[in-house]
Amino acid sequence: MEAPRLGRSSMSSPTSPCEDVIKNLSLEAIQLCERDGNKSQDSGIAEMEELPVPHNIKISNITCDSFKISWDMDSKSKDRITHYFIDLNKKENKNSNKFKHKDVPTKLVAKAVPLPMTVRGHWFLSPRTEYTVAVQTASKQVDGDYVVSEWSEIIEFCTADYSKVHLTQLLEKAEVIAGRMLKLSVFYRNQHKEYFDYIREQHGNAMQPSVKDNSGSHGSPISGKLEGIFFSCNTEFNTGKPPQDSPYGRYRFEIAAEKLFNPNTNLYFGDFYCMYTAYHYVILVIAPVGSPGDEFCKLRLPQLNSKDNKFLTCTEEDGIMVYHHAQDVILEVIYTDPVDLSLGTVAEITGHQLMSLSTANAKKDPSCKTCNISVGR
């Protein structure tokens, strides 16, 4: 669909869809057609070099779906400026699929408010994404047309990860579908035989934390940053034991739950996502108190009450530690410290290796209403 063009027809209509955008942005912003080169080619927009050209652009207060922008301008004709044009584009990715539709550039028109100016909008800003931005000053004429300056230089910036506020929104969505709690007694990790041989020979029997991949929500602050070891804990409803099938390998390390999850550890919510399927995943992080992983999570993730939450609990009954997990979500547990194989057992499973269930670098379904929030995907 062709973007609305500037002029009296698109700016003055009281029923224009642009009005909703104006209200949400608080900048009287609308999406403009794509410019070509450094000068605007839109009909109804005249060039006037007398208007000051923005320079020394500064981007600050960056979040996952907003940023503040400011710049310097010559004082000449500054009082004639009525609007700013902001040209915002996703930075081109050299590895992107050349057959995929190109992202439509976003052109914003904002009233000339005091700087810095906030640009906000989850419909055109995604978390952890690189963008380019350029600015133009404009003066709206009595006939509804504009005269504009030259475009500024182009600068680059990257939006931020989800904040704790955004993750809490995901947490609340996940709680809705978590379901009832089932008992568990072990955490387990499936890999190929060669993995465990390598751990014994090269790491003195201790599994080492590694950087989490980019699976899950695009804005997750743990993807590509948090170091840990992935474990599972879901059990089969009819047996109360771990399933015999796995997407990650035919050899399984099992460890008693109390050796990883106990009063000396903290529990954090990390993510909630699906992969175009009916079932959903919740990522939890277990970190020994005071460890580097614990300090990382304290700053970025919502902490859960280990004794009372909807996903994974650790309580004491008659002097014995009792553990429960949510039935209706698949839990992926990241433990942030090394784990020695001598603390558990390694054995071959009797089931199948279901590769289709692997979540390695899996991309989240951005259209799922169950596990998405309105701040990008």
Image (cartoon, grey):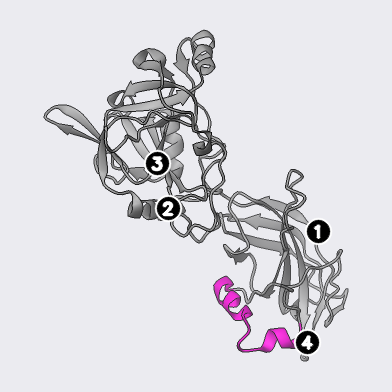
Q: Which residue is mark 1?
A: 153
> Circle 1 sits in a helix, a strand or a loop, which is it?
loop
CA distance separating discs 2 and 3 = 15 Å
Q: Which residue is mark 3?
A: 330
Q: Quadrant of the N terminus?
A: bottom right
Lower position in the chain sequence, tag 2 or tag 3:
2
CA distance separating discs 1 and 2 = 38 Å
Lower position in the chain sequence, tag 3 or tag 4:
4
Q: Which mark is residue 141?
A: 4
Q: Give amino acid for label 2.
A: Leu
Give the side of residue 93 with respect to residue 18, left or right. Answer: right
Q: Give amino acid for label 4.
A: Gln
Q: How many marks?
A: 4
- Magenta-colored span: 7-26
Q: Which residue is mark 2?
A: 170
Q: Give amino acid for label 1.
A: Glu
> Circle 2 sits in a helix, a strand or a loop, which is it?
helix
The answer to whether residue 192 is magenta is no
Q: Quadrant of residue 121?
A: bottom right
> Does residue 285 lie above or below 259 as drawn?
below
CA distance separating discs 3 and 4 = 59 Å
Residue 101 drawn at (x, y percent): 73, 58
> Circle 4 sits in a helix, a strand or a loop, which is it?
loop
In this rendering, the label closer to the viewer, 4 or 2: 2
Residue 23 drawn at (x, y percent): 56, 77
